């Protein structure tokens, strides 16, 4: 096996600018293979559109490579030939044939000692290990065309093992002197084999080379579009965008805009492409099944409409589907019907879509199944569909779809009371989204993380993530994450007793249109809006909001929605009538999955019972709520339960496990403290958690204060003892 060394070279590594958007920063580091010197050079050369993530990043740092090429050229010719053979075996396709090539030609490997002395590369039992990826690239690119052709032919000759035909074809194609229909056809077939095996990066390289060898311009455009699609599925968004720029494929352009551009532009491009595939046949990225492609594109257009929260576009897509004679995704018709108040129609369409969540299947359709289940209040089905979507995507080598599934899995995890466990999974999905150039999805995940932070009491993190999500979302017309981030801030206000601020945010959420708000989030937030409105004395608004929510709950018959509607009715009532509504709500919660909301219902019920002087039952309900909030890791809600118990005169035990570090710190403080104890700097912790160094410093200071310590040395000792 041939490997590469650690890409970081030298002790001094420049830092990237703090103003760089997170998605751009992550992708620059990926492009630079983790080498911060190369990353700093790339960052300094970015255009305004590249800095904002609208244009693809450059592929290589020219100044750094120029220095590396000079270093390689200084080596003896015999050493350079061996390095070229190793580099061609690794770049840009890893083929694992270097040792076989050396054996087949009885090459003298002693000249490699010179490379080792120069610190450029060294030999191992598995092959040649280059100092870093840039040295490997320089070793390849400094060679003459004749020498490169010779080593590619040699590597092709020794690649005869089972399953090695795609890589053999790669080397044959790389050795070609000019256009060749025969080699282009061979490379297309090899790409199909690689694609079927889930190796989209290899498929991309093969198809891109086939395009270079194809003599027909129209065929070249089609192959470049296919290569762009493979690059996208492999997670290399910048390469995909560079390739698609050489084509006129509106389908791919729309898909890339959906994940990293303006959602309205994405919708228009995807809907146009769906019509073209259905009516006129396929274009540059054609497929043998244009009708299937049209349905898939319509599903993507639906996602764009979901992101924007634009009812008009939902209607437009549904009308287009009807006109061209294809059955649209159930989420599309269901959303349009729900937004128009046709709740019976919406229920039937969404149930049909939610039912398509069996194992295997198309990841996109499974994600739509999860979205439909979420709208119906079936969080178990939503979790199942999104988990299967991620598994199906991984099985097909389509890792780029995994964070998309996690965007909607996060809702199910939140409502079923697993905020801390879900936070870790969502943070990993956020990293994947940034790495694969899906900044719109990252924005949605940031908003979800703001919601988790609101529940777990990390107010600074909630505000930082919510503001980051809203700032990005409003610039891209993403109504869904903008609304979710605002809801997170409103929930934070509600759980900390800032009822007027919460009501104001939720009132704004109800009034925002497409690109700024979202009807689905407004619906989810209604029970909290009712509570905040009543706390501020605005019962008229509360009754109006509840009436529509109750209509939906009675239509879909979701136990959780019915329970929350009953809770709203209890808040709007008084005396014995309120008590009965609370009992009804808790009975319904018992059949649902939203355990966190059940605990909040018990908290409100306990407070109502206390005011009615039903002390015994009030105490039982409040203790039950307190236990649940401590289990969920929601300190602010737990504090509200303790306050109610103290008013009852009930002795309240200190925070569970006060001698335990886990109990003394918030979730975020504990995570930061553990990383700091392991030796990570504030900047390194910030990079891992995708937060600002300022926020990390704040959390570390807060942890020190709660633990009564002053230094990291004491922190290491405490965590070691814990």
Image (cartoon, grey):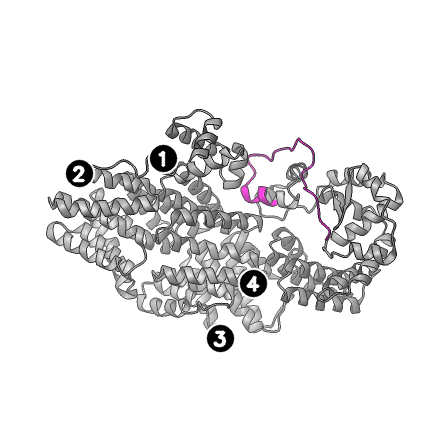
Report helix, strand or loop for mark 4. helix
Q: Secondary structure at mark 2?
A: loop
- The answer to whether 196 appears left or right of 449 in the picture is right
Along the polypeptide, which appears first: circle 1 or circle 2? 2
In whole angstroms, how far apart are the C-alphas of marks 3 and 2?
A: 67 Å
Is 432 placed left or right of 502 in the picture?
right
Q: Which residue is mark 2?
A: 650
Residue identifier under label 4:
395
**Residue tagged 3:** 325
Q: Is residue 667 or residue 582 the one in the foreground?
A: 667
How far across and down, in percent of the image, does residue 225 sit?
65, 61
What secondary structure characterizes most of the magenta part?
Answer: loop
Query: Which residue is more in the foreground, 213 or 409?
Result: 409
**Residue stretch in magenta:** 1-27
**358, above or below 404, in the image:** below
Task: Mark 1: give few (<14), some (14-19) or many (20+) Cα within 10 Å.
Answer: some
Work out how far the residue at label 1 is from the one at label 4, CA to CA, in angstroms: 42 Å
CB atoms at circles 1 and 2 under 8 Å apart?
Answer: no
Q: Foreground mark, 3 or 1?
A: 1
Does 13 lie within the magenta span?
A: yes
> Which mark sits nearer the N-terminus, 1 or 4?
4
Q: In the image, is residue 533 above or below residue 381?
A: above
- Hey, which quadrant is residue 131 in on the image? top right
Residue at the image point whose x is 62% and y is 45% from the top: 30
Camera-nearest residue between 715 and 269: 715
Is-magenta flag for residue 267?
Answer: no
| Residue under numbered circle 1 | 664
Badge 4: residue crowd in 10 Å (few <14, some 14–19, many ≥20): few
Q: Tell me the crowding category of disc 3: few under 14, some 14 to 19, or many 20 or more residues within 10 angstroms, Cα based.
A: few
* Residue at image point 40% right, 36% down: 460
Residue 42, image x and y in percent? Answer: 66, 40
Kindly report the distance in space between the C-alpha atoms of the residues bearing marks 3 and 1: 60 Å
């Amino acid at each position: 096996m041939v490997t590469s060394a650690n890409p970081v070279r030298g002790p001094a590594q420049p830092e990237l600018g703090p103003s760089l958007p997170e998605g751009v920063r992550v992708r620059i580091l990926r492009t630079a293979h983790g080498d911060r010197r190369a990353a700093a050079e790339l960052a300094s050369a970015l255009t305004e559109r590249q800095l904002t993530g609208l244009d693809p990043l450059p592929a290589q740092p020219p100044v750094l490579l120029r220095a590396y090429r000079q270093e390689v050229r200084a080596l003896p010719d015999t050493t350079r030939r061996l390095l070229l053979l190793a580099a061609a075996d690794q770049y840009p396709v890893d083929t694992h044939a270097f040792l076989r090539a050396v054996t087949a030609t009885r090459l003298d490997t002693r000249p490699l000692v010179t490379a080792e002395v120069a610190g450029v590369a060294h030999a191992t039992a598995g092959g040649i290990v280059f100092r870093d990826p840039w040295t490997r690239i320089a070793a390849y690119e400094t060679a003459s065309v004749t020498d490169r052709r010779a080593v590619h032919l040699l590597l092709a000759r020794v690649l005869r093992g089972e399953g090695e035909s795609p890589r053999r074809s790669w080397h044959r194609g790389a050795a070609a002197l000019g256009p060749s229909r025969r080699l282009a056809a061979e490379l297309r077939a090899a790409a199909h084999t690689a694609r079927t095996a889930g190796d989209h990066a290899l498929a991309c390289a093969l198809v891109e080379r086939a395009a270079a060898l194809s003599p027909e311009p129209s065929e070249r455009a089609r192959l470049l579009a296919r290569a762009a699609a493979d690059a996208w599925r492999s997670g290399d968004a910048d390469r995909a965008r560079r390739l698609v720029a050489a084509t006129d494929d509106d389908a791919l352009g729309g898909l890339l805009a959906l994940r990293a551009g303006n959602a309205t532009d994405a919708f228009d491009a995807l809907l146009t492409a769906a019509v073209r595939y259905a009516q006129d046949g396929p274009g540059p990225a054609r497929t043998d099944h244009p009708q299937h492609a049209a349905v898939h594109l319509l599903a993507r257009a639906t996602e764009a409409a979901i992101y924007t929260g634009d009812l008009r576009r939902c209607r437009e897509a549904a009308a287009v589907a009807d006109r061209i004679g294809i059955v649209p995704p159930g989420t599309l018709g269901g959303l349009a019907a729900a937004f128009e108040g046709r709740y019976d129609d919406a229920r039937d369409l969404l149930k049909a879509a939610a039912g398509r969540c069996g194992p295997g299947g198309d990841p996109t359709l499974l994600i739509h199944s999860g979205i439909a289940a979420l709208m119906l209040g079936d969080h178990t089905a939503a979790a199942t569909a999104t988990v299967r979507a991620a598994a199906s995507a991984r099985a097909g080598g389509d890792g780029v779809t995994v964070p998309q599934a996690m965007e909607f899995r996060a809702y199910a995890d939140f409502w079923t009371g697993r905020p801390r466990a879900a936070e870790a999974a969502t943070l990993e999905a956020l990293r994947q989204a940034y790495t694969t150039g899906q900044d719109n999805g990252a924005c949605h995940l940031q908003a979800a993380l703001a919601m988790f932070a609101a529940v777990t009491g990390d107010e600074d993190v909630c505000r930082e993530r919510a503001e980051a999500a809203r700032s990005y979302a409003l610039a891209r017309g993403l109504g869904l994450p903008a609304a979710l981030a605002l809801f997170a801030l409103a929930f934070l206000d509600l759980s900390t007793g800032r009822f007027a601020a919460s009501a104001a945010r939720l009132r704004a959420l109800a009034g925002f249109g497409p690109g700024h708000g979202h009807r689905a989030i407004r619906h989810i937030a209604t029970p909290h809006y009712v509570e905040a409105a009543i706390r501020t004395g605005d019962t008229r608004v509360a009754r109006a909001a509840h009436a529509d929510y109750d209509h939906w709950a009675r239509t879909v018959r979701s136990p959780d929605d019915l329970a929350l509607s009953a809770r709203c009715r209890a808040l709007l009532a008084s005396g014995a009538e309120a008590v009965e509504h609370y009992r009804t709500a808790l009975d319904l919660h018992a059949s649902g999955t939203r355990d966190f909301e059940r605990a909040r219902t018990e908290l409100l019920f306990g407070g109502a019972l206390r005011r009615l002087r039903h002390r015994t039952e009030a105490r039982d309900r409040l203790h039950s709520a307190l236990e649940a909030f401590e289990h969920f890791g929601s300190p602010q809600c737990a504090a509200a339960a303790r306050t109610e118990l103290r008013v009852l005169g009930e002795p309240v035990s200190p925070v569970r496990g006060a001698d335990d570090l886990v109990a003394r710190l918030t979730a975020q403080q504990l995570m930061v403290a553990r990383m700091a104890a392991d030796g990570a700097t504030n900047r390194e912790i910030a990079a891992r958690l995708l937060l600002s160094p300022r926020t990390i410093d704040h959390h570390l200071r807060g942890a020190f204060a709660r633990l009564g310590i002053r230094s990291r040395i004491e922190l290491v000792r405490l965590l070691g003892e814990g």
